[in-house]
Image: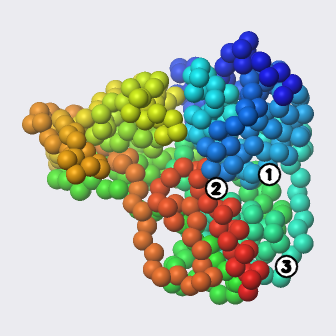
Amino acid sequence: MGNPKAFMTVPRIEAGYRAVEDRIRDFGEVEQTLNSRDRQLQASRCMDCGVPFCHWACPLGNKQPEWQDALYKGEWEKAYKILSLTNDFPEFTGRICPALCEKSCVLNLTLGEPVTCRENECAIIERAFLEGYVPVNEYKRNGKKVAVIGAGPSGLSTASQLNKMGYEVTVYDKNEAAGGLLRFGIPNFKLNKSVIDRRIRLMEAEGIKFLYGQTIEEDKLPEGYDAYAICTGTPDARDLKIEGRGLKGVYFALELLGQQNRVLAGQQFSDDERVSAKGKKVLVIGGGDTGSDCIGTVIRQGATSVCQIEIMPEPPEGYNPATPWPMWPNIKRTSSSHHEGCTRRWLLNSNKFIGKDGKLIGVEVEGVIWEPNPEGGRPLMKLDGNKEIIECDMALLAMGFLKPEHKPLAENVFLAGDAASGASLVVRALASGRQAASQIDSYLTKK
């Protein structure tokens, strides 16, 4: 490293977010950027550890110390080339990854101030596109064809890798555009869809074919291909089947998020179809990232109030002794959307939706007590009898997704991403896609 002691003199500095009063007026990306000099200083904090845990923690195996060093020295193109060896889409992970590498950074474990890996990654790829380091490559074809079903993160990763190996790749997707949850689940204020469009244009220029509006069943795969990759994600959200579920005003989170992204893309919906929080009191049920995305979205739509409830206990901030490294830290995470105006509550179970004239007016909730399970495993949940009604005109269910079930598959059909593992992180889906491509290549090579 050029400066192995920089971490002692250069503090961690994040780019931060646009001012709240500014960003809630639009759906533009909320995260800001540092200038090149400050970004290089942040990269200098990487110590090139003898045992770099960031390598181990990253599902993609990104070589952070190597590209951090190149970035620090101002060798942007070299940094891009190193980064692109392991990550097909740094522009996605650089914006929305929870940065497992940073949680395992030695500076995080010792000082609580990890290297800004995620932001540095995003800066590298954006500089690469800006200065023309990202070429349109031509790959020699091997005469074999592969169909990828699903154009989400794992499907795009699978397709990208297979294309580089020389396969003729066709990607089928049920939606009108590629991206999966990147496009129809993650709000524009976290990932502008022009970022996806830019990458898809590049993939098409390199020979990958995309077919949209195609609903493909696993037992009726399109003919004419040597192998198939099923990358259809987790299409079924976890429901809350309690009294009043059918009231108008109760929606799955993706009904809101997907439609809002389509509206921003220019699609139009009738008043009856529109899922809008304008002038409404909103209750978000579920404390994860999807719930946070709902908060930011309804605030921009004009909600009068937003409350988010979670059935689990409120975790501690900063450090949780119950989940020490190398476990994923279960700590309280406050997103940019939470800062925009939201009441957060924990240890609440939803008993029933309450309505009037077929419309939602509130949700009855009850306190929860978690007790140790004498047989081990997940703690036992008990209700404490303390009930109350939270007034709301809209309730959004953001409680995760069900792991998909698959029929027996032929030997030339492979699973990748959430379709294989159940709901997980985008970075894990990308890694799974690379693994699936390798498996397909191994299978077809042996054949």
Q: Quadrant of the C terminus?
A: bottom right
In the picture, measured across the screen, residue 387 lies left or right of residue 150, that is left
Q: Are marks 1 and 2 in contact (CB under 8 Å)?
A: no
Indicate which disc, 3 or 1, sits on the residue closer to the N terminus: 1
Q: Residue at x 42, y 71 (%)?
A: 405
Q: Amino acid at mark 1?
A: Leu
Indicate which disc, 2 or 3, sits on the residue closer to the N terminus: 3
How many neighbours does mark 2 have within 10 angstroms: few (below 14), some (14-19), or many (20 or more)?
Answer: many
In the picture, measured across the screen, residue 301 lies left or right of residue 148, that is left
State the residue position of label 2. Answer: 430
- The residues bearing labels 1 and 2 have C-alpha atoms spaced at a distance of 13 Å
Q: Position of residue 419 (x, y in %)?
A: 51, 65
Q: Are marks 3 and 1 in contact (CB under 8 Å)?
A: no
Q: Position of residue 17 (x, y in %)?
A: 60, 24
Q: Nearer the viewer, residue 306 or 160?
A: 160
- The residues bearing labels 2 and 3 have C-alpha atoms spaced at a distance of 24 Å
Which residue reaches farthest left? Answer: 385
Q: Nearer the viewer, residue 360 or 106?
A: 106
Q: Position of residue 403 (x, y in %)?
A: 42, 62
Indicate which disc, 1 or 2, sits on the residue closer to the N terminus: 1
State the residue position of label 1. Answer: 85
Quadrant hosting residue 105: top right
Q: Position of residue 209 (x, y in %)?
A: 74, 70
Secondary structure at numbered mark 2:
helix
Q: Nearer the viewer, residue 131 or 376?
A: 376
State the residue position of label 3. Answer: 142
How many neighbours does mark 3 have within 10 angstroms: few (below 14), some (14-19), or many (20 or more)?
Answer: few
How many neighbours does mark 1 have within 10 angstroms: few (below 14), some (14-19), or many (20 or more)?
Answer: few
Q: In the image, is residue 93 above or below residue 404?
A: above
